[in-house]
Image (cartoon, rainbow, N blue to C red):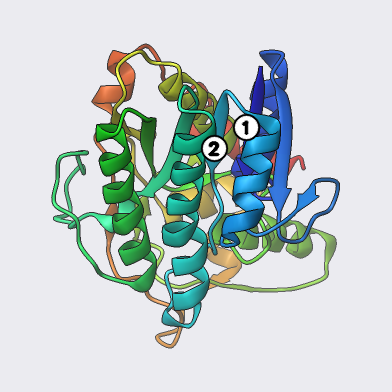
Amino acid sequence: MKAIIFGINGQDGYYLSEVCRRHNIEVTGVSRSSGNWTQGNIADKEFVRQLISENLPDYVFHLAAASTTKHHALYENHDAIATGTIHVLEAVKDFVPHCRVFITGSGVQFVNQLKPIKETDPFDASSPYSIARIYSVYAARYYRKLGIKTYVGYLFHHESPQRKGNHLSKIITTGVKEIVSGKRQKLTIGDVTVQKEWAFAGDIAEGIFSLVNQDVVTEANISTGIAYSVEDWLRECFAYKGLDWKDFVQSPDTAFKPEYPLLLSDNSRMLSIGWKPETSFRKLVQIMMEE
């Protein structure tokens, strides 16, 4: 069995490659920055076609994206997410129509009514990132009609030690460690009342693999369905070192404010197929604080 993972240098690619190996699946990882993997760009049609035609994979996982919703990443996200999806699905149709394909979706592409988001909720073109995600989902649905097993997993916030340093979870855990070591005195954070999911990326990777191995090709929220606030994360991280977060965190009016106070999923569809997240919120804090 073979798998191709586009975007393997991200946290999801890291854990998904581990899941594949445990199932004795040979992994070809693709990244624009290469590292120890195949260097290439999913936006390059001929590269994608050659890779898929030569490897004839049983699975293709499309995880490639710029992890920002900001307008400056408009073209980068369109190329990676939208155009990349078309390149993958057309190559699979032409060379390995039996292949199972995973397309990544996001909770931010839905209308957010401050209640648990379902897979059937309407989409919301709220950013260039969400536009690209919406396009890729409709492309997946089209190719599904052509007989390609195209699964869509909508991901909500998930964290791990593999997170890059510009993400909030990592900013906080790194900041706590620096305060403990004396490298800094204060941590500046935006609105600490914001609530979101704090899943473990390793659990999400297991969910992705579980989804693509379902006989019924479907779309599902791969998520915890449980919200915690930024304050909860701060409290647990500082408490892990025996500290009170209120003594070290400042939230000036000029600090970043997110576009929503709550981003939460309804994960009942994934629970119904037998998958559930195994890592608790407190355990995730422990994993990242002990990194």
Residue 48 point in image, percent of width and height = 61, 50
Residue that lies at the very extreme toward the front in this rendered image: 94
Residue 66 point in image, percent of width and height = 54, 64
Give the label, 1 or 2, closer to the camera. 2
Instruction: Give the image quarter of residue 219.
Output: top left
Residue at 29% from the left image edge and 27% from the top image edge = 218
Is residue 280 shown above or below 158?
above
Q: Earlier in the sequence, mark 1 or mark 2?
A: 1
- Residue at label 2? 61
- Left or right: 254 in relation to 53: left
- Element marked by disc 1: helix
- Left or right: 152 in relation to 142: right
Residue flagged by tag 1: what amino acid is it? Leu
Is residue 235 shown above or below 171?
above
- How would you rate the neighbour count of disc 1 (Cα within 10 Å): few for under 14, some for 14-19, many for 20 or more? many
Is residue 69 shown above or below 234?
below
- How would you rate the neighbour count of disc 2 (Cα within 10 Å): few for under 14, some for 14-19, many for 20 or more? many
Kindly tell me whether residue 240 is visible in this rendering.
no
- Element marked by disc 2: strand
Residue flagged by tag 2: what amino acid is it? Phe
- Left or right: 19 in relation to 252: right
Quick check: marks 1 and 2 in contact, CB under 8 Å? yes
- Residue at label 1? 16
Residue at 28% from the left image edge and 45% from the top image edge = 264
Give the quarter of the figure containing the N terminus.
top right
Distance Cα–Cα, label 1 vs label 2: 9 Å
Kindly tell me whether residue 11 is visible in this rendering.
yes
- Left or right: 175 in relation to 270: right
Residue 254 point in image, percent of width and height = 43, 88
